[in-house]
Amino acid sequence: MRVYNATNETNEALDERCMATHLEYGRRWGYPTHILREDVKGKGQWIELVFSKPLYMLSLTVAEMAKPANERAEWLVFFDSDTILLNPNIPWALFLPPSDFSDIHFLAGRDWGDGSGFNAGVFFVRINEWSVKMLTEVAALPDLRTDVLIGYNAEQSAFKWVVKRVGYREHVLYQPVQWFNSFEESFGHLPPVQDGDMLIHFSGLKSNKFGAIQKWLDRLERAPQDLQIPLVNTSYQANVDAYWTRLRDVRDMMERAETFISEGNKPTQELLLARVQLQQTVYNEADKSSFVLWAIDRVTAALAAVESQLDATNAKGNENIKMTRKSVAEDKEPPNIQAHGLDRESRN
C-alpha cells in the first residue's frame, strides 16, 4: 500500500508517467495504491504544506486499524511523486522485518545529504498503535513544539526528531537507501543507479530535474528489459539476508554481555562503552555493514578480555585454595599411640 505525495513542485505530465510505473507495480503484486492529489495542509506554504505527508499516512493507518484485525494491511509504503518504479521484479515485502524482528515498526533509508537521519522520499510504516502515535507526533510537531528547528525539509526533520526519541528509536531501523530509494544525483555520496535497481528518486535536483525524469522514463518505456532484471539475477536477496544476519549477531552479542553482567560479574569500562556504541550504531547506522561489524567486534573483544581476566582470577583463587589445603594437611601430625607415656605393651 503506497501513497503519492502531491506537495512538491511538479510537472503534471511527468507525474502521471511516474505514477503509472507505481500503479502497474501495484496491480502486478496486488498492492492497493492510494494517491493524494490535494494538499491537506498549508495551501501553498511549503513549511506547512509538506505535513500533508504524515497526515495522509496517519489517515490511512487509522483506516486500516478500524478494520477487523484479519482484514488489515500489515504495512504502508510511502513514496514521493518524483520517483520511478524501475524494476517491478523486486517486491516491497523483501525488505520487511522477519518474524523474529516483530518489534521493528519503521524502516527507511538515511538521507545522503547530512547523514543524520532518514530520507522521507520512501519509507515503511507498520500498521499498529505505535505508528498511529508516531505519525500523530510528527504531524503535530510544528504546532506543539515551536522550539524545535525543522528548517526547509520540515516533515523530514520532524520525522528525524520524533524517531530518535526513547520509545521510538528502539523500533526503527535504517536500511541501505539504494535498495529502494536510489538517487539520480547524490554528488558522490552514493553509488550511481544501476540496471536492476528497484526505484530511482530525483530529490535534490533543481533546473535539470524534469530532464532527468524524462530521460529515465524514456529509457524504461523504450527498453524495459534492460532495467527489469529478475530478482534471482540481482544481489538483493543476498544483501537483505546478510543485513538481518548481522542484526541477529548484534542481538546475540548484546544478550551475551547482558547475561555476563546480570550474573554479578563486574564489567570493564571498555565493555560498557562498547555496548553503548553497538546499540547507538544499530539505532543510527544499521545500514552501514562495516560500522555494525566493527561495533560487534568491539563488544566481542571487550567481553573476551573481561571473561579471560575473570577466568585467570578464578584459576588463581582455586590454586590458592589447593595450596592452603595442602599446607593444612602437611601440618597435621599422625596419631600418637604412645600418648600419656603409655606404650602398646603397657596398655595390654
Image: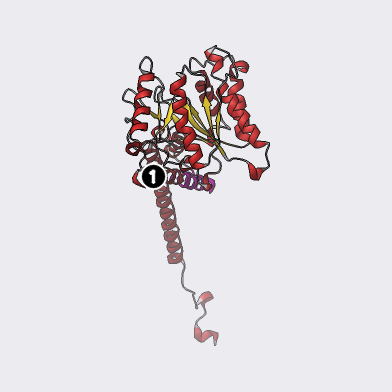
Q: Quadrant of the N terminus?
A: top right
The residue closer to the viewer here, 43 or 164, is 43
Image side of residue 235 versus residue 328, left or right: left
Q: Where is residue 109 in the image (x, y as percent from the top left)?
A: 44, 31
Give the secondary structure at mark 1: helix
Q: Name the quadrant containing residue 116.
A: top left
Residue with the mark numbered 1: 231
Label 1: how many Cα within 10 Å (few below 14, some 14–19, many 20+): some
Name the amino acid type tagged 1.
Leu
Instruction: Give the prevailing secondary structure in the magenta stretch.
Output: helix
Which region is colored magenta?
Answer: 249-266
Image side of residue 89 versus residue 127, left or right: left
Q: Where is residue 25 in the image (x, y as percent from the top left)?
A: 47, 37
Q: In which quarter of the image is the C terminus?
A: bottom right
Q: Is residue 52 visible?
A: yes
Residue at x-position 51% and y-position 25% = 160
Q: Name the quadrant containing residue 147.
A: top right
The residue closer to the viewer here, 1 or 22, is 22
Q: Is residue 279 above or below residue 11?
A: below
